[in-house]
Amino acid sequence: MDLLEYQGKQLFARHGLRVSDGRAVTTVEDAVAAATEVGYPVVVKAQVLIGGRGKAGGVKLASDEGELREHAGDILGMDIHGHTVRTLWIERASDIASEYYASVLLDRSAKQPLVMFSVRGGVDIEEVAEQTPEQLIRRHVDALRGLSREQAVEIATEGGADEDVIEGVADALTALYEVWIAEDATLAEINPLIVTPGTAGEAGGREVRALDAKVSLDGNALYRHPENQGLSDSANEDPIERRASEQGVQYVALDGDIGILGNGAGLVMSTLDVVAQAGGRPANFLDAGGGSDAGKVKQAVELILANDSVRAVLFNIFGGITRCDEVARGLIAAFADIQPTVPFVVRLDGTNDVQGRRLLEEAALPNVYAAKTMNEAADKVVALAAGRSVEDAPAGAGAGAGA
Ligand code: GDP
Ligand code: MN
């Protein structure tokens, strides 16, 4: 679950990471009120779940109300790489002496948390990672001991942080690691982590502060964080994915035109592969689980058909505990209700598959093609999605074949 910048900053603040004062708003008038509260100059920042907002014109400085109105008006409704801006974050602007980079994530191959730090932060960190990887410090952390003070200082020092802010950077790294652990994040990234120019006063201390936040939370651990459950940006979520999660169904939107539905995550994943191999492009991943009752089947079919790019659907059932005849009954009942107009290829194999295919045959559902094997099903569905006909007649002339 990805968080918007301002939501990430709220988590940062909860764990003692320094951030600037700001307000989230959705209208120009509220932006003006927010800027008056935090004080000019302010930064107007598009809140969308995609990086590179600065380069796309979604981050603008405003030194007075006139500029603020202009920028807020421009950025609200702006499209940034396919994401429409509906929320702005109005933040007290910072003076910047340096832009650093810091992140914590899980290094799956090493099975350890990884802390990364660079003094070459800002908008082109990917370039740094590619062209001068030695300027991006990567250090694994012992998950049981956590990030020690010594290691945090060492990372800041080796990364080349300015002498006077080493302690400040170490504080930021420690707090960022704390966010990652305590909030069950999968990613906690700050780019830029800025160093302020400091004041001329006798303290003159330069400050280290998070100017951006990219945080992803582990959705499977959300039950441990009731306070974070409202954080997902439902306006930017795929509406079908949201509906599916409300119904407790595993659904992932993909960008092809063949709906994929199966029982069991492993089977659905291999179905995606087989369809891709047959030259098709899956429109989704949907695991209907072990259930076979009409209600569940209907729900799953409705979810798939809610995506209007779907031109054909492959329903892949491997019967084990779930019996194919029950699934067939569920499907027949569901189809009587929904009456889909896109073609369905139904592959029933395993427990009671013969009975299942016979039931489908007898029901003579229009637009439903039976298949015995996964490859046969994939070939048929790819042909149907492309608008070609398949040799077998609908509703399983030959549904009993191969039994
Ligand atoms: P991103 O482009 O989506 O990564 O958005 P960021 O929040 O990282 O902002 C992009 C860039 O805008 C930063 O790297 C800064 O250079 C600049 N920026 C953001 N906030 C401020 C600010 O308070 N003051 C100044 N001077 N520049 C800022
Ligand atoms: Mn950034």
Image (tube, rainbow, N blue to C red):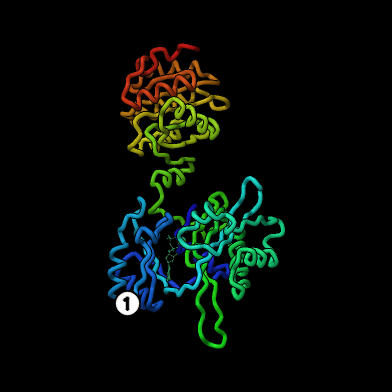
Asked whether 391 or 213 is in front, the reply is 213
Residue behind mark 1: 64
Q: Is residue 393 above or below residue 231?
A: above
Rendered residue at 63%/72% (across/down) = 167
Q: Quadrant of residue 64?
A: bottom left
Expressed as whole percent of the image width and height from the top left, the position of residue 307 reads: 36, 39
Expressed as whole percent of the image width and height from the top left, the position of residue 132 reads: 55, 55
Whether residue 222 can be seen here: no
Rendered residue at 46%/40% (across/down) = 251
Q: Which element carries disc 1, helix, strand or loop?
A: loop
Asked whether 100 or 379 is in front, the reply is 100
Q: Is residue 397 above or below residue 137?
A: above
- Extreme residue in the right direction: 145
Rendered residue at 28%/71% (across/down) = 69
Q: Quadrant of residue 146?
A: bottom right
- Extreme residue in the bottom direction: 202
**Does residue 3 appear to the left or right of 43 in the view shown?**
right
